[in-house]
Image (cartoon, rainbow, N blue to C red):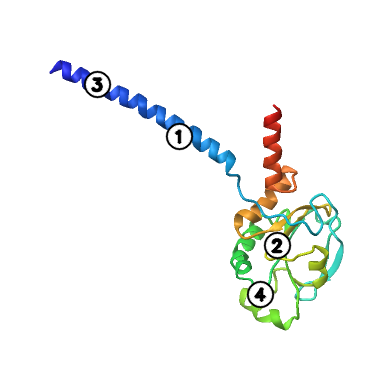
Amino acid sequence: MIDALIVSNVLLWVLVIVLSGVVLALVRQVGVLHERVAPAGALVLGDGPRAGEPAPVLELEDWNGRSLRIGGADPGGRSTLLFFLSPSCPVCKTLLPVLDSVRSAEDRWLRVLLASDGPRPEHEDFVREQGLSERGYILSSALGLAYRVGRLPYAVLIDEGGVVRATGLVNSREHLESLFEAKERGAPSVQDYLERQRGERRVA
C-alpha cells in the first residue's frame, strides 16, 4: 500500500515537471509568434506627401462655410487628422463612430477633419443622416489631389508644425491608431518602426 502511494506520488511529480516544460515551451513559441506577426498598421501608398515632408498649405471652407487652414504651423499647437471618405464607401461609415471617439478623447492635441469631393447635392443626405455638418466636413477636390488620394478610406496625420507624420489606408480602429503610434515613435509607419527595431536587435 505504502509502495503504491510512493510510486503514484513519483509519477505525479514527473507529470508536473513534464507539463511545466511543455508550458514553458509554449510560452516561448507565443513570444516568437508575437515578434513574427507584427501589428498591421495603415497601408502606406507611394503617392502624395510622405512622412517627414511639409504638408501642402490650403485655405478651404467646411460644410458650413467656415474658413479652415490645412497645413503650416497650427496656432493652437494641435495636430490635424485628415480622414478622406465618401458617401458610397461602407467602410468609411463604419469608422465614423471611431473618429467621434478619437475626437472626444484626443481633442486637447488633435483636430479631426473629414474630407471628400464631388457636387454638394450628392453629400447632403449623407451629411444629414450622419450628423456631420458640425464635425469639420470639407468638400474639396484640391485637397484630395494635394495628397494623391486614390483609395478610401485614407488618413493623413499632420503635426502641430505642419509636417506630415503618417499616412495610409485605414480600414479599422487599429489602422487609425497606428498613425498616432507612428508619430509617437518618430517613424513613417508602425511597420517601419518594427523593421528598425529588428535591425537594431540583429546588430546588437
Res 115 → quadrant: bottom right
Q: Secondary structure at mark 4?
A: loop
Q: In the visual, does 164 lie left or right of 176? A: right
The earlier-in-sequence mark between 4 and 3 is 3
Mark 2 sits on what residue?
Answer: 154
Looking at the image, do the residues carrying marks 1 and 2 touch, with CB atoms under 8 Å apart? no
Identity, as a three-letter code, of the amino acid under mark 3: Asn
Q: In the visual, does 12 lie left or right of 191? A: left
Q: Is residue 92 above or below residue 13?
A: below
Mark 3 sits on what residue?
Answer: 9
Image location of residue 7, percent across then percent down: 21, 19
Q: Using the image, tell me which numbered label, if any, was put on residue 87.
A: 4
Distance (Cα) linking label 3 and label 1: 26 Å
Q: Using the image, tell me which numbered label, if any, was put on residue 26.
A: 1
| Residue at image point 77% right, 56% down | 46
> Residue extending furthest left?
1
Image location of residue 189, percent across then percent down: 71, 48
Distance (Cα) linking label 4 and label 3: 69 Å
Q: Secondary structure at mark 2?
A: strand
